[in-house]
Image: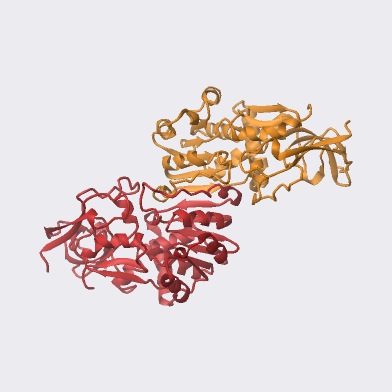
Chain colours: A red, B orange
Amino acid sequence: MQNSNHRYLLKARPDGIAGPEHFMADTQPIRQPGPGELLLESVYISIDPAMRVWVSENPGYVPPVPIGGVMRAGGVGRVLASADPAFRPGDYVNARLGWQTHPTVKAAECQKLDLRVGSPKDWIGPLGTTALTAYFGLFDVGAAKPGETVLVSAAAGGVGQMAAQMAKIEGCRVVGIAGGPEKCAYLRDELGLDAVIDYKAGNLAAAYKAAMPDGCDVFFDNVGGEQLDLALASLRERGRVAICGRISQTATSALYGVRNLGLLIGKRARIEGFIVFDFNARYPEARAWIGQQLKAGRIHQRLHVLDGLDRAPTALGMLFRGENTGKLLVQVAAE
Amino acid sequence: MQNSNHRYLLKARPDGIAGPEHFMADTQPIRQPGPGELLLESVYISIDPAMRVWVSENPGYVPPVPIGGVMRAGGVGRVLASADPAFRPGDYVNARLGWQTHPTVKAAECQKLDLRVGSPKDWIGPLGTTALTAYFGLFDVGAAKPGETVLVSAAAGGVGQMAAQMAKIEGCRVVGIAGGPEKCAYLRDELGLDAVIDYKAGNLAAAYKAAMPDGCDVFFDNVGGEQLDLALASLRERGRVAICGRISQTATSALYGVRNLGLLIGKRARIEGFIVFDFNARYPEARAWIGQQLKAGRIHQRLHVLDGLDRAPTALGMLFRGENTGKLLVQVAAE
């Protein structure tokens, strides 16, 4: 067992894409758990687009990560020492690990993983927050119904690939947007999507028309900007846009201006933002549904795993440059 | 009784604000009603922002007015001759009159006015489509609740002044946006709004902050553009935007780009467009509520009445230049 907790602290708030220059490494002695606490070993740390919001001045729905504070992150950890009777060394937990190898956390804020339902990797993957985000965004906010056309942006990303597969399972016609032939082939050939739009191939408006000659009923949006603007034009009557992310809008100083909002009137269409944590009480329902799909082999989550905590500061930028295929995470220790 | 039907036909589709150059006058002999038809005398013709959409190439929810066709318009007419047993000469009706003095229309598409409930002027005013638009936009789409802060744009306009008064009646804190000191005084002193924003006074962002230090829960939007963008920034958690119109966006070739859509995520906020005709089945409910308020003296609709059909082609542009206070209409004949 190590004696040191390696961490990354927020050094400066990025305006554009976050990179290693915005974080600094730090080493502290491990802190043994006090009453009601757990000492964890981080195993998987999830790298999420929401982190860009967390490091901004005014994230809104959570306090900003303070300058000099440990970078906030969720993930799967293993209990090394427990001062709470409900947890034992060796247990796996979902926890707010932060970017650190050996966090000491409140037991009440950890969720013990049921390894009969899935492996620790499943729990960060198809049973994790990313998949839950897809589930509630698609079925609750987007209200996708069988037979409808569902458009998903960043469809090869962590949330996108789950939303796309869930929509297929539900009986929707699913169109995915991704960047480059490799990701598009993955969507078409491995996920079996009905049509694919390569946003890097140029003439996006024509590509939307070709992929969705009759428009779309639901747009699950992880990207924002031009892809959202064109989706508003493509939206059918009573269409719904679930805004999950805006990964294209990396600089708050240079936001894309969406011109097609007026079309919502004649279309009686809706745009709605959401945060997965609000659906907390219904996670069991979602996990039960996803668990069934996993067992039946109808859903899988492609993971993009980077090795070691030291990859975290560069990993975040990969999301915004579209360099990941599948859910991005850092493996800090072996399972 | 006249022998001629004076009309205005659509001559060309405007890109910017519609003016007399887009219409042409025309005179036809009056056509006597065939079976199931009525010959009407137009009394009041409503001039509505939606007309800008109707003369465009792709209005979406209704067919475009064809070039050379009579300009579409709703209003109140008096029956001159009836070939339908349900109507008699002298009856007043709500009808799609068009810009013409003596339309011959299908009786099935007319609604006989109950003059015990209100005068013909009331029926084009507080009992008319404009008021119904405010009712359903505010209470259904916007879901305004007592104690909430409601922001209304074009608050001195036909729909806006009704929405603002309805929100006051419901127990909301109401903030109105209008252009110039005269309209703002009307909102503050005559309608009793809680705060007023003069969009012509400059520094709109600061004016929003001053009028709504804690933000707004509902934005009833008749304007679009910058006023909408700033409202998104001002929106509170779970805020709702009911998009009713976009009167600021007169040229489809130069639409304002809305930059704050990403804020919907953290705010879990919603934007929704609507068309009053979809609520057709519930008009009686709305009129019953409005009728009560009228009787109690709690609501009134200021009308901006222009004299004579020949004013119609210039009237439309007045809406988009903000030259009207209250609902704009053309009086074609005496009651």
Residue A62, relative to residue A301: is it above or below? above
Residue A171 as seen in the image, left or right of residue A2: right
Task: Please say if A10 is above or below A166.
Answer: above
B17 left or right of B74 in image:
left
Q: Nearer the viewer, residue A223 or A34?
A: A223
Q: Quadrant of the C terminus of chain B?
A: top right
Residue A99 in sight from this viewpoint? yes
**Residue A317 on image: x %, y %:** 31, 60
The x and y percentages for residue A32 are 12, 60
Residue at left offset 43%, top offset 46%: B260
Residue B195 visible within the image? no
The percent position of residue B10, horizontal first and vertical second, equals 73, 42
Q: Residue at x 47, y 61 (%)?
A: A138
What residue is shown at x 56% (from left), y 52% (from top)?
A269
- The quadrant in which residue A158 appears is bottom left
In the rendered image, the vertical position of residue B100 relative to residue B307, given as above or below: below
**Image point 36% across, 46% down: which residue?**
A253
Nearer to the camera, B144 or A14: A14
Q: Is residue A168 above or below residue B99?
A: below
Work out whether residue B54 or residue A98 is closer to the camera in this orientation and state it: B54
